[in-house]
Image: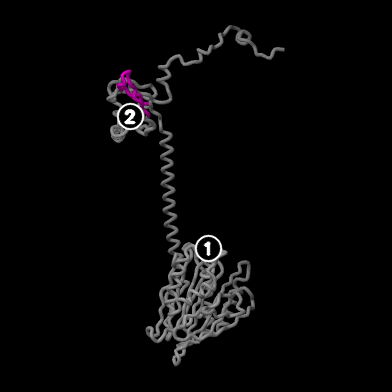
Amino acid sequence: MSCTGPGPEEAGGGTAPAPTFADLLEDSPEDLYDNAPCGYLSTLMDGTIVKLNDTLLGWLGLERKAIVGQLRFTDLLPVGGRLYHETHFAPLLRMQGEISGVALELKRADGARLPVLVSGVVKYGSTGTPLLTRITVFDATDRRAYETELLRSRKAAEESARQARADRARLQQALAVLQQSLLPSTLPEIPGMEAAGYYHTASPDRLGGDFYDVFPLDDRRFAFFLGDVCGKGPEAAAVTSLTRYTLRAAALHDPDPVAALTTLNQVLHERYSGVDPRFCTAIFGVLEPSPDTGHVTVLLASGGHPPALVLRAAGTADFLHTPGGLLVGALPDPRFSAATTTLAPGDTLLLYTDGVIEARTGPDRSSLFGDEALRAFTAEHAGSARTVIAALSGLLSGLGDGLDDDTALLALGVPTPASTSASTSAPTPKNTP
């Protein structure tokens, strides 16, 4: 059985000559030139067009007789392209003998513009004299459409980025306002004492949970507190607000520090003991100045918070520990204990949140600033409340990216007789990026 198909005679009933290799070749160079997928034209050295193919004529929508010998290449260009041709394209072509990939536009008969990519080469005679220029023109309509879409997309992306920056700025401003509302705008004047506070925001894009406050209990005593709510964001801000107002209300009912923290624990535990537990660390205290001696008695209690520092006029600094204090709100019935100290003229009580002691001093969290470094630093800067806060604010700024948590500071000091009369320095809490 034959594996071949029917022959020409069997299939068609006649004889058909097989195509030869020559039959498959272009036998008309002129046809190849005229119907090429790109445009061709030749000009004399003065730019007069002496030849162009049908492809280019079709693109332009013009008659050959209206172009050949009648127009120069620059006549096909709009004003901007003509200027570019005279100042860049033609000079470079004359100097280099060839040029490629130049983006131009050609004028069509209907007034439209055709984006093209143009290449040119100078043809020389046997004596080296330039005779004519041959120019190849590629339709760049698709490329122009792509570039237009790319430009549109880029502008849209830039507008989106601009809008995002504006939205972020508005958000940061709103967060800053809300953060400030969780802190006292000023601290009250405490007779015979000086107070200063500072707040460092680690990130302007999130609300912190650190807080502090100072307020009068009666005409002689003042209460103060400082703490840190777990978490960040709106949820932490809500707990912070609740904590501040609960402590203020509790102190007016019973100013004993242990009683105030116990009340706060009950409120937080009852409200947040479900699927989303919330708790905080806090120090609460009462100041009782003695007009006769100039000393101030301090009674305070702590719930899981870093111990306060007592800076003495002699240049020492020691922690005032309150053992047994658990996180506020974590357990239904925690035990808090109180501690007492006396501030003499030149002494300062410093309260702080853990942002400063947990700041990184190395590339990772294996190197933290720590309690002892803070104690040593404050001992070197012992003095008025304002002096200590100024030194610590500089320290926080110097920690840079190592300070990745918010930090609240509150200093309460007794001025020395040589200082200004007993007054309170209560700067507006600052938020630093």
The stretch in magenta equals: 119-135
Q: Amino acid at mark 1?
A: Gly
Q: Residue at x 36, y 30 (%)?
A: 99
Does residue 122 lie above or below 339 as drawn? above
Q: CA distance from mark 1 to mark 2?
A: 61 Å
Q: Nearer the viewer, mark 1 or mark 2?
A: 1
For the rendered model, the colour scheme is one colour
Q: Quadrant of residue 328?
A: bottom right
Q: Is residue 219 left or right of residue 228?
A: left
Does residue 207 lie above or below 196 as drawn? above
The quadrant the C terminus occupies is bottom left
For disc 2, the marked residue is: 93
Q: Residue 362: horizontal and vertical position, in percent? A: 53, 63
Give the secondary structure at mark 2.
helix
Task: Please give the label number shown on residue 362.
Answer: 1
Q: Residue 364: horizontal and vertical position, in percent? A: 55, 61
Give the secondary structure at mark 1.
loop
> Would residue 238 be visible to someone looking at this image?
no
Main secondary structure type of the part rendered in magenta: strand
Q: Residue 314: horizontal and vertical position, in percent? A: 47, 83
Please report whichever mark, 1 or 2, sits nearer to the chain's N-terminal start.
2
The quadrant the N terminus occupies is top right
Q: Residue 406 versus residue 231: which sits nearer the camera?
A: 406
Q: Residue 267: horizontal and vertical position, in percent? A: 58, 76
> Would residue 22 be visible to someone looking at this image?
yes
Task: Please give the label number shown on residue 400.
Answer: none
Q: Is residue 97 magenta?
A: no
Q: Is residue 133 magenta?
A: yes
Q: Residue at x 59, y 6 (%)?
A: 14
Q: Residue 94 versus residue 15: which sits nearer the camera?
A: 94
Residue furthest bottom as drawn: 292
Q: Circle 1: is it few (<14), some (14-19), or many (20+) Cα within 10 Å?
A: few
